[in-house]
Each structure stands twice: as C-alpha cells, then as structure tokens.
Amino acid sequence: MLSASRLRWFAIVLAAWAVVVVARLVQVQIIEHRTWEAESARQRERTVEVEEPRGDIRSRDDRLLAGSVERVAVYANPRKIPREQRSALAAKLARLVDRPREEILADLEGRDGFYYIAKDLDPQVAEAIAKLRQRGVGSLRTERRVYPHGSLAGPAVGFVNAEGDGQAGLEAFYDRTLRGVPTLYRELRDGRIASTSLDLRLDTLGRPGQSLVLSLDCRVQQVVEEELAHALAEARAKGASAVVMAPTTGELLAIGSLPSYDPARVGQTPPEWRRNRAVEDALEPGSAFKPIVVAAAMAAGVLDPWEMVDCSGGGIQIANVFIRDHALYGLLPVREVLAKSSNTGAIRIAHRLAASQLDATIRALGFGQPTHVELPAEAHGIYRSPQHWSGLSRASLALGQEISVTALQLARAYAAIANGGLLVRPTLVLETRDRSGRVVTPYRPQPAARVLPAHVASSLATLLESVVEDGTGRAADVPGYRVAGKTGTAQRASAGGYAAGRHVAWFVGFLPMPSPSLLIVVCIDEPETNYWAAEVAAPVFGRIAGRVVTLLGVEPTNGERA
Amino acid sequence: MKIGGYRPSNNWLRRQLDTRWRRWVSWCFAGAVVVSVVMAAFVAPRQATLRMRYEIAQLTRVVDHLEGEQRRLLLEREVLTSPPVLAASLGTLGLVPVSPGRVMHLTRDGDLLRPKAKPAPTPQVKPARRTR
C-alpha cells in the first residue's frame, strides 16, 4: 500500500509533467506556430520555376541579332520505370530522340535517378513523349539562343551560357530585362520527399522577357566590320575597332571590334577575342588629342582660331626634354598646326593654359570617366588630376600622352565638337518592347550638357576640315562631302614607358560639314606593316564614311546638279 | 366449425384502388421536367463554355505550333538575308559596293545631286616622329 505522502508526491510529479507537456504544446502550437508551419510547408512543398521566353535583340533596321527558339529536353528516372518495360521503351525513345537504342537501354539500366536522355530537340517531340504515357519519362521545355547574323556585332550583342544567363555584351548588361520573370508553381511532395505531381499550383505568374531595339544599323555594322577586317589583314594589326555615332543624339549606329566571335560558338574562340575593344581598351590617343587642347585654349580665351602659333626651331625644350617636330615649321596658323599635326604648336598652345583650365576641359569632355554606354566592363581610361602632373604633363597631354582613352570616349568628345559643344551620352538601346511588340520603355534621348561654347565648337570643327583637305587626314576624304577629322599615331604604353615597335593608329572624323550627322572613330591596334594613322586609319575612315553616306542617303555638301 | 364443400372466397369484394399515385407521378414528372429545364438553362451555357475552353485549348496549341513555325521561318530568312551572308555572295554575283562618287541624290527640291569628286590626294611624306 502506498502511503498518503507518497501518493501526494506521485500526484505532484504527474502534475508537473502535465504542466511541462502543456507548456511545450503552447510553445509549439501557439508561440512558434508560424515557424513550424513554415517549416512544414518547406518540407511539404517545392517551388518549381519555369523560365519565360528570353527577349530578342533587334537592330534599328529590324534585323534579329539575337533570339530564342523553343526546344525540348527529354528526361528519364529509371527508378520509376519497371525493369521489364525498359527494353521496349528504349526502342520507342531511340526513334524519337535519334539516339541508338542500345545506348538508351544501357543508360536506363545503369543510371539511378533523374537524367536527361537528350536535349535541344524539336518541340514536336514533347507531344510524342506525352503520348507514350510512360511513368518516369517526360519532357521539359527549354530554349536555345540563336544569333542569325553570326559574328556581326558579336562583342556588342554578347552571349549567354548553357543556363541562359547573359555573360557578355548586351546579353549580360540587360540580362534581367531580357530574361523576364519566371512563372512559379508550388508542388506538393509526399512523405518520401518525392514529388506527387498531383497538385501543381500556380504561385506567381511570370512575364516573358522584353526585347531590345538597338540603335545599331546592321548594314552600317556590316560595312564597319568589312572595312576593319580589310584593314586588319592589310596592316597585319593585332586588333581594330570602330565606332559610328550620330553626334547630335549619341546613338551608336555601329560598334565594331576585331577580332570578333560568333556568340553561338563562343567556346571555340580565344578569350582575348571576346572583349569589345571600342569600350574595353583604353589607349593613348596620340595627336587625336590635339583638338581637345586647342578647344581648351579657345574656351579659355587664350587662343584665337585665326592667330599664328610659333612652331619654329624644329622642336621645343620642356623640362629638360627636347620634343621634336615632324618638320621645320615657322609661324603656323592654328588650322595648319592641326593640319600638319605640329607637336611644337600643340605644346605652345597647351602652355598658354593653366593646368586647371586644361584639366577642366578634359574632364568636361568626359575623359577619365565612363560614358555609361549600355555595355559591361567599360574602361574608364586613365587620366590623372593636375596635382599629380609633372613639368612635362601639359606638353605630354598636348601630344596625347599621359592619358588613355577608349574609342567611345574619343567619339563622345569629338561629338561635342561636331554638335556645337554638347556632351551626349553614347547609347545602344533605343527602346524595349514586350512580347507582343508594344513599347515598354520608349526612347528618351538623354539631355546633353554644354561643355564647350558653341562658337568654339563650330570654329574648331571648321579648323579640323583642313586636316582632311590638305593635312595628315587626306586619305579620309569622301568625294562630295566636307569632312573634318584628326589623325593620331601613338606608341603603345607598357610598364614604365613605351614599347618599341608597338603603335596605335587613330582617326576621328565627322561629316558632312557644317552639320555633321555621322561621327566615326577608327582605331588600329599594333599595325605591323605601317603604323602611321594617316596611312592606316584615315583610309579606313574614308572607306567606311564613303559607304555609310551612300547607305544612309546623306546628301553631299559639294554636289553638282546632274 | 368446418363445412364440407365450402371454400371461403372474397371474390365478391370490389377492389378498392388508390388512384392518388397517378397524381403523384404526374407531379413528380412535372417536377422533373421543371428541374431538367432549369438545369438545362444553367448547364447549357456552362457546357458551351466548357466546349469553348476545350476548343481554345486546341486552337492555342495550333497557334503555338504555328508561331513556332513562323519563328523558325523568320530565323531562316534572317540567316539567308544576313548582311555577312549577302556580302559573301556579292563576289559570286559580280556585285561591288558603289563608290559615293557614282551615287546621285534626289534632293527635296527634286534635283539630282552628284557628289563632286576632288583631285586624288598627293602621297604623304613620312615623318620620323612617333606622334603625328
């Protein structure tokens, strides 16, 4: 017999136990209700993400530069396929996916769990697979990215990886826009965490990717790439790039970079071919920078476009360094300084400016800063502020040294000279459209900032005409059109100095004067046969400009009535 | 008591038939007709909707298929008319890009304007400096 005191203790222990159990129940069921409910849902449900079709990339002349086609992948899960059915199933699948029956059967026998039998199949295969009504075999909708024009504008368009993620060019920069929003389904799972496929509930309705309409014109792009390829082969150069821009709006009509690649076969090209030289390579501009120094001097009011500059002596002594000129010149007007590309003249003009004045114009024209074009990995270029300048820096800048620029930066700066002093933002994307072709993001030209007085820009543009008329840029002439531009030959900078025998040839120009509608930058990197811009880059400009004005129907400025 | 040769019979009784069932059946039939009519009135549009949904699903598949086909043909056309492909076949066709000097422009005034060619540039003197 239990004594009364023992019974009391027993009751107390039972009561305490009951209190603990109830407290735990309150904690789990009431206090931590949300946490455990979420945990339960996590174990019970699975989110299935179905990608929506990726948007297209189209040129302004409505050519498809990148698009997606629907494809199908067929999968199998041998665990769910009875052993005796596998042989017959392999025979049926072999016909559908065009693979040997023995190979499929070996996979069905040897593999354990989900695997793909075949990918990149015609969408009609999905219907045939569904008709098989075979448990453990199914099809999934996939996409293949296609680039109908091959390597045309390849570095600008970019490419996607096997998972469909943008890796370079516009494909990477606009990945989220092109990708759209995937549709989400919630799927119930059974006790063995296997999907029941009974209750596939729509969670979030997706949105197909938007299409991009580019400012690129496929015809102009083709001309640019053809001429660059011709120049590359002729000069045996390491690389070449060119930019064709509308100077008043900043719209890029073409952006060429060679060697190039076909985005559909990106794995077969060396990595160094994949970069877009026009935006990723920052190089010294050489004499193509002289007009910037002249613009700074004219804007600061220390240079009159019609005055004479002392270019005598065959060179000039700056900070214990004698910088030679190309020839013995005397007094030259500013237009001749530019036309003959006189080093002495440019240095004397630069030395009229205070460091801060020169710095202000260089910065205002966007050097040392990205242009914010819609491409990834854009180089900022190298430009040091005046506190880091040496006694030689102003002279070096006058010759286009101690600064590195991209072809696009140079195009933007020259566009300010061509359009009357406004700094435009280079742009590649005009608008985005939805799947049905409705405009989602309409084209809104970025407001341009005034960086040069209008009279300075127009005077300088007129001065630059002399470079093509009777200066170093005569090969850039386009019959019937008034062309303004500037050559630039620079040595390739390497660690601590300049590499011997490695040069960069530039030509930047615009036409038709006096209201230019086209601005073209040509850059030939490390030409071997001849490195002078006048003979390597200027003719390329001339050929590109000559063909582009015909293509776009630009009226001649020096025309005669037929 | 038992009387020989006599068998009791109720043949003389006239059957008392309950004829109310006819009314019930009539009411039930009428009710069924009313319910059927009402149901038909409700079901018919739904059935039509269902049929339309089925047809829409079928047609959507056809549209998807045709859109896929259209896209395939579009891509094929893009490839065939691609500027690099056309440029590559120019030589075969004996075509060359037209030089600007050979193009005449129709102005807004209706005049034909021919670009005026300049004299050929003189060869450059090659200076011996690295920048020019």
Image: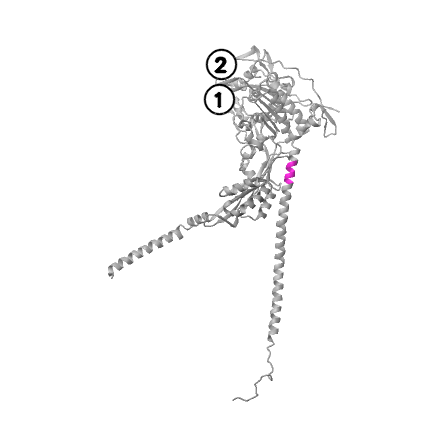
Q: Nearer the viewer, residue B49 or A414?
A: B49
In the image, residue B81 lies at what x, y percent?
A: 66, 33
Q: Amino acid at mark 1?
A: Pro
> Which residue has dot 2 on it?
A319
Callouts 2 and 1 on one subunit: yes
Main secondary-structure element of the magenta-colored stretch: helix
Circle nearer the N terminus (2, 1): 2
Question: Viewed as shown, does residue A106 lie left or right of B58?
Answer: left
Rate crowding at label 1 as few (under 14), some (14 to 19) or many (20 or more) other CA atoms within 10 Å.
Answer: some
Stretch in magenta: B70-76
Instruction: Tell me the element at label 2.
Output: loop
Q: Report the disc number at residue A386.
A: 1
**Chain that bears disc 2:** A
Q: Report the disc number at residue A233.
A: none
Q: How many marks?
A: 2
Q: Quadrant of the N terminus of chain A?
A: bottom left
Q: Quadrant of the C terminus of chain A?
A: top right
Q: Is residue A393 magenta?
A: no
A154 in relation to A90, above or below: above
Q: Residue furthest toward the right?
A: A562
